[in-house]
């Protein structure tokens, strides 16, 4: 086991005994929502995974230790600290560990720590991707590179609609990352169920997805997979409303000169403000929905 990694006893026992485990990220706790809603949501997501027959492993860095599985006190520590916690991708992990700081893990960092612990399935809201204007800025999320090389399947509601979805799809295709739609031919766009982009394969059951993943990794085809799970219809937002809010937020982003890893938190927060908080409510529901599917996939995968 990695010398910097602590696996929660319940998670370690589940892995050792072949029980299903689902990883969860921690950026959504510190940077995604305000206190105390962030802590409440994190605990509810863990309960959804339990209710669907798997063990949750929320991933973060606490006092310089990589954590695969948090207790309630650790979740609340991150939740109360909020945006003062370092948002960690691959490049940030050595610094935060060396300095013995707290860190909230992005999709990329969560995948890395999950793989260290032996966890194959990860539920999140939406993956990062190619940002709009990347032709000039080269602003491309490290999530995409991690998906190309780390053997963890990421269940999400597609890519965040603040991104350039056509370029994100092209980037994933170039890097050989399969995009699997769960009962959908279209790539969901986070707040909305569909976009103009397609998925690679439409698979209609958790077993089909688990079979795909099992064969992929048995063939030593390195890298993860995107499991695109549309937001439930009753929580989906009107596309025109979201598009208008995103355009306004992107304009303000440019005016304020915000870039890099600060872009996504700013855009999501501004879209939430412009939609009267409706986008935050949708965000929470889609995470619950992804956790449910991830638990089902993890169960089928461990039964292989």
Image (tube, rainbow, N blue to C red):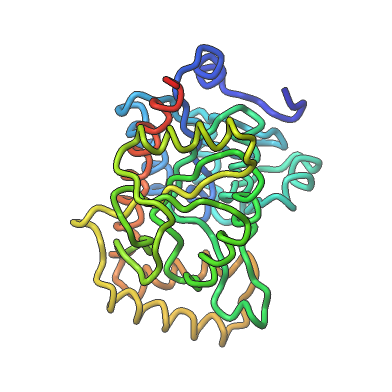
> Residue 224 at x, y = what percent?
56, 44
Above or below for 172 versus 59: below
Q: What residue is at 52 percent from the left and 46 percent from the top?
A: 225
Q: Nearer the viewer, residue 55 or 303?
A: 303
> Residue 218 at x, y = what percent?
58, 30
Quarter of the image for the N terminus: give it: top right
Q: What residue is at 51 percent from the left and 28 percent from the top?
A: 71
Q: What residue is at 60 percent from the left and 67 percent from the top?
A: 262
Considering every residue shown, the one lying at the far right of the view is 98
> Residue 279 at x, y = what percent?
33, 64
Q: Nearer the viewer, residue 177 or 74?
A: 177
Kindly indicate the quadrant of the structure image that contains residue 50. top left
> Residue 40 at x, y = what percent?
37, 41
Give the total number of marks visible in the rendering: 0
Is residue 190 visible to us here?
A: no
Q: Is residue 235 left or right of residue 227?
A: left
Is residue 116 visible to us here?
A: yes
Considering every residue shown, the one lying at the far left of the view is 234
Above or below for 123 versus 239: above
Q: Is residue 147 left or right of residue 291?
A: right
Kindly indicate the quadrant of the structure image that contains residue 134. bottom right
Q: What residue is at 45 percent from the left and 55 percent from the top?
A: 126
Quarter of the image for the C terminus: give it: top left
Q: Is residue 21 left or right of residue 12?
A: left
Q: Nearer the viewer, residue 57 or 155?
A: 155
Kindly indicate the quadrant of the structure image that contains residue 101. top right
Above or below for 201 versus 222: below
């Amino acid at each position: 086991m990695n010398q910097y990694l602590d696996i929660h006893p319940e998670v370690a026992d589940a892995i050792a005994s072949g029980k299903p485990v689902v990883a969860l990220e921690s950026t959504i706790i510190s940077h995604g929502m305000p206190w105390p809603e962030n802590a409440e949501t994190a605990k509810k997501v863990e309960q959804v995974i339990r209710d669907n027959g798997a063990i949750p492993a929320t991933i973060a860095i606490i006092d310089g230790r990589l954590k695969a599985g948090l207790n309630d006190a650790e979740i609340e520590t991150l939740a109360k600290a909020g945006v003062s916690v370092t948002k960690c991708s691959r490049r940030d992990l050595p610094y935060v560990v060396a300095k013995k700081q707290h860190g909230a893990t992005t999709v990329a960092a969560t995948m890395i720590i999950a793989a260290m612990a032996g966890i194959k399935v990860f539920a999140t809201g939406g993956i990062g991707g190619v940002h709009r204007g990347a032709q000039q800025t080269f602003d491309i999320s490290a999530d995409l590179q991690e998906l190309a090389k780390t053997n963890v399947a990421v269940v999400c509601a597609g890519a965040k609609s603040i991104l350039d979805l056509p370029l994100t799809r092209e980037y994933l295709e170039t890097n050989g990352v399969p995009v699997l739609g769960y009962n959908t031919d279209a790539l969901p766009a986070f707040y909305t169920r569909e976009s103009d982009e397609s998925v690679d394969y439409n698979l209609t059951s958790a077993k089909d997805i688990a079979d795909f993943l099992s064969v992929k990794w048995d063939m030593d085809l390195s890298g993860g997979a995107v499991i695109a799970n549309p937001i439930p219809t009753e929580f989906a937002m009107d596309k025109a409303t979201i598009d208008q809010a995103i355009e306004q937020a992107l304009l303000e982003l440019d005016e304020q000169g915000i870039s890099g890893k600060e872009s996504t938190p700013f855009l999501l927060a501004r879209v939430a403000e412009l939609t009267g908080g409706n986008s935050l409510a949708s965000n929470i529901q889609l995470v619950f929905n992804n956790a449910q599917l991830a638990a089902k996939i993890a169960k089928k995968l461990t039964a292989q």
